[in-house]
Image (cartoon, grey):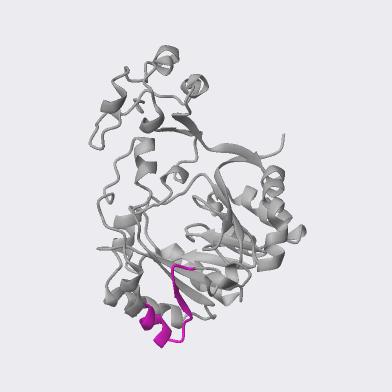
Amino acid sequence: MAHQVLVTDIQRFSVNDGPGFRTNVYLKGCPLRCAWCHNPETISPDPEIYWKARLCTQCGKCFDVCPRDAIEPPVPPEEARREDAAYYKINLDRCDRCMKCVEVCLHEALEIVGKPMTVEAILEEVERDKPFYDNSGGGMTLSGGEPTFHAAFSLELLEQAKQRGLHVCLDTNGYCAWEVLKDLSRFTDIVLFDLKHLDPESHRENTTAGNQVILENLTRLSEIGIEIWVRIPVVPNMNDTMAFHSRAADFLANLPGRIARIDLIPFHNWCQDKYRWLGRHWPLGDLPSLDTIFLEIPAGVYKEKGLATTIGGSGFENIGEALGG
């Protein structure tokens, strides 16, 4: 049987994760637990369930079929849908993800998160848009979660993508053994490398892991000459100070190899629904999204060091280019 991993989404026509129009493949599973994570459904490598209160009629079919009493008794739909509702359909401590509740849901209020897919199935989906890649300089971006978390699968996927003539980006947090990253880079055109913090304690506090191996991997990756786009998620109260940007600019400008560009990615809170659907509290849910205007001065710090820098990370210089104008 062909090897499979769980995929949370295959997103077509992305313009923010590498050059041109791209198809983003999101693998499920990540070794970090970033406080600001915008894709919480990709953290666990196991199947999960979304419960969408707005679609739920509280019919009780899931309650009747659950073998572990992990479904809460029905309540009036309007009560469950209130913004301040404490009600969540699934008792996550009891649930064993048998998915019987999903099978009987008539309104798609319960949804499995994580579809098992083979390399062949992923590439069949990705190649559907090959004409758009050819016209825009786009291709496939392997993301997550964290692709290095599924090292053998990711290596096979990237190798076969290159054999089919696809342009490939690898979106990674760099938290892995160097040999894994080195192997994957052999079949990668551009590495999109996340840099979250330079201070090890601040990094650990906000991601649950240190950053020594990440900084070492970025340094070694720059030495082998592959094209690197460093992406910095700028999060209020975490790494949004000028002191951080000055230090980061110095570090990146003094790496042994050239960094092709820096993308400053402003924090946003548009993923709040995902946390609610998973039954998780998101401590940053009330934090306002960061307006791009506040990154213009920090961007200048990197540019002064000779580093090409964008805000937002678009793969096009302008929307007219994206539309073929």
Tally of marks: 0
Furthest toward the top, the residue is 64
Q: Position of residue 150 (x, y in %)?
A: 57, 48
Quarter occupied by residue 21: bottom right
**Which residue: 51% across, 59% down?**
172
| Quarter of the C terminus within the rendering | bottom right
**Which residue: 62% across, 60% down?**
184
Q: Is residue 238 left or right of residue 176?
A: left
User: Looking at the image, can residue 147 be seen?
Assistant: yes
Nearer to us in this view, 214 or 276: 276
Nearer to us in this view, 288 or 283: 288
**Which residue: 64% across, 48% down?**
153
Q: Position of residue 210 (x, y in %)?
A: 37, 59
Q: Position of residue 203 (x, y in %)?
A: 33, 61
| Quarter of the N terminus within the rendering | top right
User: Looking at the image, can residue 221 be seen?
Assistant: no
Furthest toward the front, the residue is 325
Q: Is residue 80 left or right of residue 37?
A: left
Against 101, is 265 above or below?
below
Q: Position of residue 243 (x, y in %)?
A: 27, 77
Magenta-span inclusion, residue 237: no
**Which residue: 43% across, 18% down?**
62
Magenta-span inclusion, residue 304: yes
Q: Is residue 184 left or right of residue 289?
A: right
Q: Which residues are magenta?
A: 299-313
Against 86, is 204 above or below?
below
